[in-house]
Image (tube, helix red, strand yellow):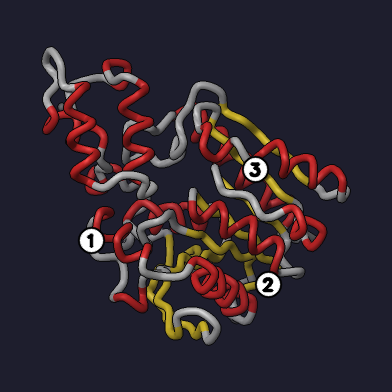
Amino acid sequence: MKQHKKEDIKQEVFDLYDEYAHNKIDRRQFVERLSAYAVGGLTVSSLMSFIMPDYQLKIQVKADDSRLKTETIEYSSPKGGGTIKAQLSRPAGNNKKLPGIVVVHENRGLNPHIADVGRRAALEGFISVSPDALTPLGGYPGNDDDGRTLQRQRDRNEMLEDFIAAFGTLKNHPECDGNIGVVGFCFGGWISNMMAVRVPELKAAIPFYGGQPDDQDVPKIQAPLLLHYAGLDQRVNAGWPTYEAALKANNKEYTAYIYEGVNHGFHNDTTPRYDEKAAKLAWQRTVDFFRKKLV
């Protein structure tokens, strides 16, 4: 199916995958409903092959990239999952303190793509920590289906504590200058919004297509926000007008972009939801925002 083009696939298939990826339907229902779009040269198996992530061929910055010093660390999250494992990455040979970024995964643990994003952030001159909230359940299991199943077994507010603890770990790291932001994707976007609520010292929060906090929490936000939304993402975008009204009413600093004609997950280059133009623009805006705010 890899020979087929993104344009060959109906938008309904992407919407169906979104339901599946966010636990609205199970795998059996996904396959059954996908069969309705298996017409002509498209089979269910080829559609499945096309729509699912391809981690092996899409890594941009390998774990052993010589430009970086990347390692696995453990830190304490007493209000969350206890001991949490994370990827820590920063430029190799660095001899000065760096601003820090907490990189927050989607709803399936620290998969290869998000670990890659953490390393991309390090290549931009930051020290990044990318926690795996599935650590208490054995860590990311090697595939997203099982990862989603495991993540559903954890309380999301306890996972929020894990990422808040990662902020504290990074702040106290001898190679970090104490200026820290957060970027997260999907579930991680919600975490990013909530860290802005919960962590007064946070210098910047950048949610990619993330769920919004409750209105009563918005006054607590101190960090400037850069928000990325996908134009076709009706599920997440439904909460944006109310959130924006609350941000305005409370005089909060924010910049929001809606990338028209792209799907939820457009930054993830391992699936056909990826949109190269929007992803590169959003990432450059992200890096520029961190460089401006993490001072």
In the foreground, 9 or 295 = 9
SS at mark 2 in the image? strand
- Type of the residue with mark 2: Asp
**Few, some or many residues within 10 Å of mark 1 (<14, 14–19, 20+):** few
> Is the residue marked by circle 3 packed among few (<14), some (14-19), or many (20+) residues within 10 Å?
many
Under mark 1, the amino acid is: Gly
Query: What residue is at 33 percent from the left and 61 percent from the top?
Result: 63
Instruction: Point out the tag, 1 or 2, that comes first from the N-terminus.
Output: 1
- Point out residue 162 in the picture as x, y percentages from the top left corner: 51, 74
Q: CA distance from mark 1 to mark 3?
A: 29 Å
- Horizontal placement of 127 versus 110: left or right? right
Seen as rendered, the residue at the extreme top is 40
52 is higher (above) or lower (below) than 217: above
Of circles 2 and 3, which is in front?
3
Residue marked by disc 3:
227
Q: What amino acid does circle 3 point to?
A: Leu
The alpha-carbon separation of the residues under discs 1 and 2 comes to 34 Å
Q: Which mark is residue 177?
A: 2
Figure quadrant of the C terminus: bottom right
Query: Where does residue 182 sit, x and y in percent of width and height?
Result: 60, 59
